[in-house]
Image (cartoon, grey):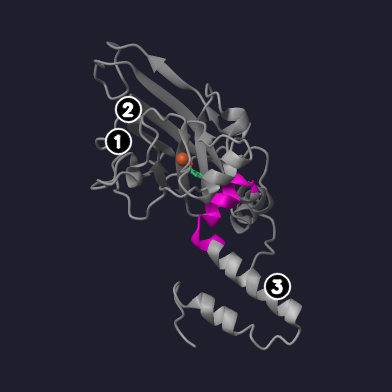
Amino acid sequence: MLNLDENTITSEALRRMQNTSNPRLKRIMTSLVQHLHDFARQEFILLSDVLGLSMLVIAQNHRKPAACTEATVFGPFHVDGAPEYLLGADIANGAQGQPCFVDATLRGVQGEPVPGATVDVWQSDEAGFYDVQYDSNDAHRARGILHSDAQGRVYFKTILPVAYSIPTDGPVGRMLEATGRHPWRPAHIHFMIVAPGYEKLVTHVFRNDDSYLDSDTVFGVRSSLLGTYRRHEAGSIAPDGNASAVPYYTLQYDFVLNPRPATLALATGSASHAA
Ligand code: BEZ
Ligand code: FE
């Protein structure tokens, strides 16, 4: 049977178990397929996140030199096709929150700047919601794509991230409650950085003053991902050159990207065994 879709694949997988001659095995396999597919439909990735499985897999698959910025969970709120912005732009695009100016550098392990990287950024607003969580999701807010300049710098205006609860209206929420766990994530901004010659980096920069750093419900915090979001009083000149009428925040953070093995071999002049 070709072109099975999400509505037909379960019955086809169950049908293929029908010739199992051992009745006990048949019952177990039928039950496994049914439950596995139900889990996949109901927040399976979120379940993997709150059970620590996502971070376990990331830890196994993203071993890097100690100097490199660590990876963390992707989460459900990234969307493809976010708007492209010029450096210095305001990516909040109407999302509510206190102004925050982010200034980041991208470097390789030898300290070399990484120009021309694609930097996909996304975050929640001051109510703790991503744009896609609103019924009136009519525009991309607090998300966007930027490109690093010749010095490997990426800077933009956004809003201060706050701690928020992951969605609790499904089975994962019931599981957290039943096991006496809270659903909170410490405040963070998500980054996905793609640069030629370097490994893709999916990570966050957390607020280092958040009270949930030790108990992130998805186990995503690494001490190297803590950033200082510095508060500045109203009236001072913000990084965009204007005197800010309201208090604002600045974040300076340096990302260190892991070179792809072939690139590293070329850079060090050693014989490459990479295909
Ligand atoms: C997030 O940070 O967007 C996220 C990550 C894992 C689960 C839920 C949300
Ligand atoms: Fe998030």
Residue under the point 70% across and 85% down? 20
Residue 37 at x, y percent in the picture = 55, 67
Q: Nearer the viewer, mark 3 or mark 1?
A: 3
The amino acid type of the residue labelled 2 equals Gly
Instruction: Answer whether residue 108 is visible to the viewer in this image.
Output: no
SS assignment at label 2 = loop
Disc 1 is placed on an element classified as loop
Q: Secondary structure at mark 3?
A: helix
What residue is drawn where x is 34% and y is 11%?
A: 233
Q: Earlier in the sequence, mark 1 or mark 2?
A: 1
Q: Which disc number belongs to residue 92?
A: 1
Q: CA distance from mark 3 to mark 2?
A: 51 Å
Q: Determine whether, in the image, residue 231 is placed left or right of residue 109.
A: left
Up-down: is 34 above or below 138? below
In this rendering, position of residue 64 left or right of residue 192: right
**Label for residue 28?**
3
Near-viewer residue (162 or 12): 12
Q: Given the image, on which type of amino acid does mark 1 rest? A: Ala
Name the residue type under label 3: Ile
Q: Identify which residue is drawn at 50% across, 58% down.
A: 42
Judging depth in this view, the residue of 256 and 45 nearest the camera is 45
Q: Quadrant of the C terminus?
A: bottom right
- Percent from the top left, x then y, of residue 207? 50, 27
* Whether label 1 touches label 2, CB < 8 Å: yes
Instruction: Measure the C-alpha gap from mark 1 to mark 2.
Output: 9 Å
> To which residue does mark 2 refer?
97
